[in-house]
Image (cartoon, rainbow, N blue to C red):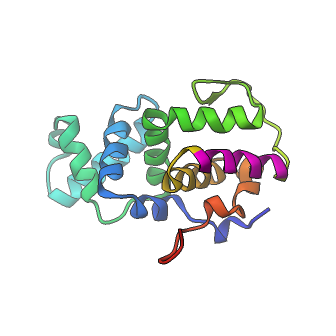
Amino acid sequence: MTDLSTATRPSQLWKQLSADRRQMAADAFWRDENAMAEQAEALAMIAQRIKFRLKSVQAMPTDKKARQLVSLPAVSEILAARLLVSYHLQHQRPLMGRFLDALGITHEDGLIADEEVTPPPADRLGAAARTLAESFPAEDVRLYLSTLVWQDPETWGGLADLPQVQPVTAGTP
C-alpha cells in the first residue's frame, strides 16, 4: 500500500481542477446538507478575505458564495476533501456506480450500501480502474480514485499506485 504522504492531497486535487469543475464542486458543496462544519469554515474564510461580516456572507446567494469560495487562494485539507466529495455526489454518480459494479460491491446510485467494505484485492482494483478508464475521461477517473484513497486509505489505498491515479504530465496521453 502506498504511503499517503506521497499521494496527492485533497487541496492539491482541488487546485488542479479546471475552473468549471471547481465552480461545479463549490456549487454542490453549498447545497450539501452534510457539509455544515466545512461550510462554516468556508464562510469564515470568505468573510475574512472580502472583509464582510459573517452574517452578510451567510446571506449571499449560493452562486455568489460558490464564486467566492472558488476565488480563495487556498483551502484546508478538510474543506478540499468535502468539496471533492460534494462534487462526486452531485456530478459523478454514474462513474461511482460503474466502479462499484466492476468491483461487485452493492451500492445505491454510487453509494456503498454496506457499513463495512473489505479492501478489494489489487487485481480487482486494477480491473475496475481500467473499466472506468474505458468509459470516462481520464481526469474524472484520476480525481475519483484519488479522492477514494484519501477518504479511506485502508480500503482504497491499493488504488494509489495504479496508472489511472498518477498525474498526467505534458506529452503523456
What residue lies at 29% left-to-right and 50% top-to-bottom? Answer: 44
**How far across and how far down the image is residue 128, in percent?**
71, 45
Residue 133 is one of the magenta-drawn residues: yes
- Magenta part of the protein: which range? 123-134
Most distant residue in the bottom direction: 171
Quadrant of the rendered structure where residue 98 is? top right
What residue lies at 47% left-to-right and 77% top-to-bottom? Answer: 170
Horizontal side of residue 25 vs 162, given as left or right: left
**How far across and how far down the image is residue 157, in percent?**
73, 55
Magenta segment, prevailing SS (helix, strand or loop):
helix
Front-most of residues 54 and 81? 81
Quadrant of the rendered structure where residue 51 is? bottom left
Point out the image quarter for the N terminus. bottom right
**How far across and how far down the image is residue 171, in percent?**
49, 77
Horizontal side of residue 29 vs 151, given as left or right: left
Q: Is residue 34 above or below residue 154?
A: above
What residue lies at 33% left-to-right and 43% top-to-bottom? Answer: 24
Residue 156 is one of the magenta-drawn residues: no
**How far across and how far down the image is residue 126, in percent?**
75, 52
Front-most of residues 65 and 118? 118
Horizontal side of residue 86 vs 54, given as left or right: right
Circle count: 0
What residue lies at 28% left-to-right and 60% top-to-bottom? Answer: 72
